[in-house]
Image: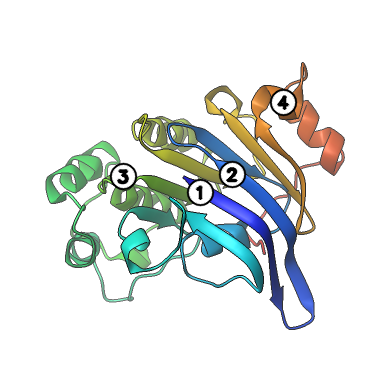
Amino acid sequence: MLEFINVTKKYLRRTALDGVSFSLDAGKVCLLLGPNGSGKTTAMKLAAGLSRETSGEVLFDGHRVGAREKARLAYMPTENYFYNYMTVRDAGRYYADFFNDFDPNAFEAWLRRMELDDRDRINKLSSGMSAKLRLALILSRDARLMMFDEPLNGVDILTRQQVIEAILTARDPSRTLLISTHLVDELEAMVDTCVFLKEGRLIAAGSKRDTCGDVSLKDRYIEIYGHGQEGGEADA
């Protein structure tokens, strides 16, 4: 499904990813783990075709990500990417124009489930409501690879479970769900595969059992990164 082969990404003098290799299979929920600055967002943008690797290869179904591959993958970034004048309804129309697999009826259903009003201006939404809108847009597509960059950031504790349950509805034997996070407690029960990044380098990748052994995901995270999970939304 998705494969990183010795991938390095440099920004001027800074190396965001350094020789990273891993592969993700269809039908799995995969967590891309690490504190801020570990390279999670960079890896997702490479997989989404929004950036190009400095060296190595990123392959989706055996091909470099081009127009054909982009039509079959969906990416939910942390930042808002809509024009200030747009309403929630405008965002749905925008997606319908750009993605053939976007289902307007499913989008309307997700808006009701997320308690979003399609008349609301996007720039007036709270961070949590904005995250729920981006999630509704992604889940209204029929993409084979769905990527969620820090979907729990800026989301209150009551909404987090709603977001997790929504993501799980997209689970399918033919689809891969890739979620980047440094908040592991809420997500441990849903994970099949883990990819641990630290300062742009791969620490471990594989099934949860292979990467964590008999310890919890949280304990393995603390073992790798120290005794504190960082807050905030910035990443590299």
- Name the residue rendered at 43%, 37% in the picture: 163
Q: What amino acid is labelled 3 in the image?
A: Leu
Image x and y of residue 206, in percent: 66, 34
Is the residue under label 4 in contact with that under label 1 (CB below 8 Å)?
Answer: no
Q: Earlier in the sequence, mark 1 or mark 2?
A: 1
- Name the residue rendered at 48%, 32% in the picture: 28
Q: Earlier in the sequence, mark 1 or mark 3?
A: 1
Q: Which residue is mark 4?
A: 210
Image vertical order of residue 16 relative to residue 74, above or below: below
Q: Earlier in the sequence, mark 4 or mark 3?
A: 3
Image x and y of residue 69, in percent: 36, 59
Tell me, for residue 148, which label it has, or none: none
In this rendering, the label closer to the viewer, 1 or 3: 1
Is the residue under label 3 in contact with that under label 4 (CB below 8 Å)?
Answer: no
In front of the other: 61 or 223: 61
Outermost residue, top side = 214
Q: Is residue 102 left or right of residue 131?
A: left
Q: Which residue is mark 1?
A: 2
Outermost residue, front side = 62
- Name the residue rendered at 53%, 72% in the picture: 51
Outermost residue, left side = 105
Quarter-of-image position of residue 91 = bottom left
Q: Which residue is mark 2?
A: 23
Is the residue under label 2 in contact with that under label 1 (CB below 8 Å)?
Answer: yes
